[in-house]
Amino acid sequence: MKMRVNGVTRSVAVDWQNETLLSVLREFLNLPGSRYSCGIGQCGACTVHIEGQPVASCVTPVSAAQNKDVLTIEGLASAAGELHPLQQAWIEESVPQCGYCQSGQIMQALALLNEQPDPSEVEIVRSMSGNLCRCGTYDRIKKAIRSAAQTMREAT
Amino acid sequence: MAKLTRRNFLMATGWTAGGVTALYLLRERAIAHGPSIIFPNTQSGASWVQIKSDGKCLMFLPRMEMGQNVNTGLAQIVAEELNISVEDILGITPNTSEVPPIAFTAGSLSMTLFSRPTAHAAATLREAMRARAAKLLKLPIDAVMDAEGGFKAANNRTVSYADLVDETNVVVEFDDQQAPPALYTFDAQRQKKQVGQDVKPLNIRALVTGGAIFSGDVPMPDVLFGRTIKPPVRNASLATLETNGVSNVRGFVELVRDGDFVGVVCKTPGSVDAAMALIKATWSLQQPINQGEIDRLIDVDANMAAGDLEHVLKDHAHRSAVKWAIDLRFDVQTQTHAMQEPRSAIAVFATQGPEKLEIWTGTQDPWAIKRLAAMDMGMAEEAVVVYPQRMGGGFGGREHYDVELDAVRLARAVKRPVKVQWTREDEFTTARNRPASAHRIRLATGAQGQLTDWWHGYITGHIFLARDRLPGWVMPVKRLEDDLGVVRGAQPPYAAAHLRVECSDVDFPIDLGVWRALNAGPAIFAMESAMDELAILQDKDPVDFKIASMNGEHPRLQACLERVRALAEIETLAEGSGNGRGFACGIYEHRCFVAMSADIYIDEQTQKIRVERMCVVQDVGMAVNPGQLRAQVESNVAWSVGMALMERFEVGDDNILSSNFNNYTIPRMEDMPRLEIEIINQPTIPPAGAGEVALIAGPAAITNAIRRATGFRALSLPVTFSDIKNI
């Protein structure tokens, strides 16, 4: 079984083909940036993209990603280490407290901006409502999304 | 180990090699960690800062990070003392064999305990460097002035730290019996460059790029995966066990059983899930687990009717038979931490050479884990090393040898590295929750409506002295004393000529422990609700009434209240029914002051109580990093919304019902109010912690607003839309 993860084709060993996408990313491919938190698709900490669409990788069997493009938080910055505007905005706004949910928050925010480059307050809240943050960084997440959206619009 | 001085210890472990290191020493040189004792000596703070031969600054990070980003504030202090910037500092989190024990990270005490030792260490280093610079410049010491990254002479000749340090290993000690060097951090006249700035959290880049920073992220060759069964409460014993078919699961490695400890080890996480699903256990309980049992245990009225409660915290000129203006009972339900990261740990035993056990885990108390793992395995403490990792949230719930025990025992059984990742359900089942509590508050007033009598009795579960947080033989004696978690926040800021505060703490059928703000959250919710109701009864403005009732004794709290009222009034409350504004305030641990307002709206259409806007004014002394202080306020606002309107840890019939985020509701983005936050900076008052402060006032601000909007007095938390409509 093969899939493209962050642009690189990766093989999944037979023993790992019945696992969740999250387990394969974290434990087999050594990409721990997508985090395990609820295991039932209720909190968004494990959000990755398959073919550009956000999914909860903790409830997605790895087979669902076979021969597809998977994007994780590790694939967001450029190869030279230049951060994505969302990551840059997350730093500018000092969003993270414990930081555990933030990979998923950023991946969900990316899905939103791919769909809607200039989201309203209501659209941001609707899109992010599946991503929990126990530390309560929501206000800063909103600000960071708005600021990244502006940077991205100005760049195009 | 305890015989080694810190100096010798650090030199022996290589930390001080090459460069000049300043050590801050206290007379008390090691923590006396007794068996399972989780109250370290608060004098045990130590600090070191080092300048290497290339001029780089290394700093030992004494605190475990879980979202409070406290080491950033300590790095700012070092930067201020050394005239460098935080970016020039490399922070190092030591493992447990590299430094002597450090006090565990808890209780919002980090800034209180560590700011001064850290400043001392850095200032000591600076002055040692100045002496070297004087020699180099052939000038008297007082002719050597500060410059960025070093020193300068009157002729503007500069000397950088790099010029002053070679590969020789030098340790400069500061002993607390000496006169201290000038501490720039605490100099109110100084124009500060680092302290007081919004410096970004250290390592923020790793947090936004998915770096391997939590214990479950640590790469480990040949690792296996394991998990264990969890009883609904730790004092349960295994009654029946079925494991049929477990060994047939694909990827199965071993079923491990040792008394009530039962777990599996497999090759992949998915095979662990499959194997665990086949294990069926039932448990014998010492106490029935159900809501009725908890309600019975905390029945404050029945117990007060029967006589004094167990601990009388305050009593002066108490009168039990006066005409009470307010006589209300307030209940707060059990709540759990639900930190975003379910706990995980990796344990590795050396397969050759001398006996050795290594543990990677996120914990508030790495040295206790080391000691307890050694005891558990019958090993020498020196043979155990804990590598502390960042925690994905702690909130008081990560002090114990729990997930580490699972990993250690499974790894020993299979003689391979084992990673244990608790499921979300494991996290809920094993949580040491904040107990439910019931409060009876009686207030009486004099001829002018002034407060004359205050009588607060409450019952809650044990917190610091909860079952199995200390060895059983210590408990009966310990419990004669006040449980410092149970009594926290119970002292009112209001003056009454006749005052009594009493409480009882009881054994709950579920596990209990430390949770953000401990008893102060529920107690101050009850107190601030009662005072609000008294103001309403007298047709007085609640802010004016509370300030008048303080009798001038708490100027810092009074300033917070006055300022928060001004902030709230910047916006006029929306017209129409269903809108309300409430206020509340409180003092946490005698040094942290907060006042809050909440504007709420009862939304008939969505059938929700909406918190629209909150204002917070907080004074915790010197604001080392105002941005991070605001972040802690934001976090406490989210927790206030959860505590007031959402969170209820539910038990069933001898089991725990709350298992995940689909049945234990925590705030989402749409539940958050707009925020106005103001941090009062007190440059001459040492910084106190902010991690738990605003949670003491937030819930009552919200429920007081509900009272104004609807006439409904929330007597039980959490309060829901249907509670309001069902009266």
Image: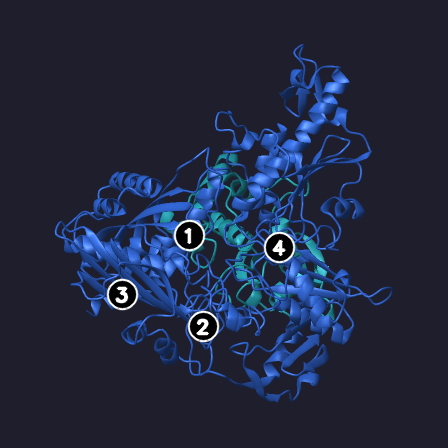
Q: Look at the numbered disc 2 and give the secondary structure of its residue.
A: loop
Q: Which amino acid does label 3 sit on?
A: Leu
**Sequence-first tag of 3 and 2:** 2
Task: Tell me the residue at 66%/12% (across/down).
Answer: B156
Q: Which amino acid does label 2 sit on?
A: Ser
Tags 1 and 3 on a common chain: yes
Q: Is residue B663 something that shows in the picture?
A: yes
Q: Look at the numbered disc 1 and give the secondary structure of its residue.
A: helix
**Sequence-first tag of 1 and 3:** 1
Characterize the local packing of mark 1: few (<14), some (14-19) or many (20 or more) Cα atoms within 10 angstroms: many
* Cα gap from disc 1 to disc 4, whole angstroms: 26 Å
Tags 3 and 4 on a common chain: no
Which residue is denoted by mark 4 in the rendering? A33
In this view, which residue lies farthest toward the right? Answer: B353
Q: What residue type is labelled 1?
A: Asn
Task: Tell me the residue at 52%/70% (across/down).
Answer: B477
Q: Nearer the viewer, mark 3 or mark 2?
A: 3
Using the image as rendered, state which of residue A41 and residue B238 is in the foreground: B238
Characterize the local packing of mark 2: few (<14), some (14-19) or many (20 or more) Cα atoms within 10 angstroms: some
In this view, which residue lies farthest toward the front? Answer: B317
Q: Colour of chain B?
A: blue
Q: Look at the numbered disc 4 and give the secondary structure of its residue.
A: loop
Q: Look at the numbered disc 3 and give the secondary structure of its residue.
A: loop
Which residue is denoted by mark 1 in the rendering? B636
Q: Mark 2 lies on which chain?
A: B
Characterize the local packing of mark 4: few (<14), some (14-19) or many (20 or more) Cα atoms within 10 angstroms: many
Q: Is residue B669 something that shows in the picture?
A: no
Question: Measured along the vertical axis of the image, is residue A93 above or below residue B338?
Answer: above
**Sequence-first tag of 2 and 1:** 1
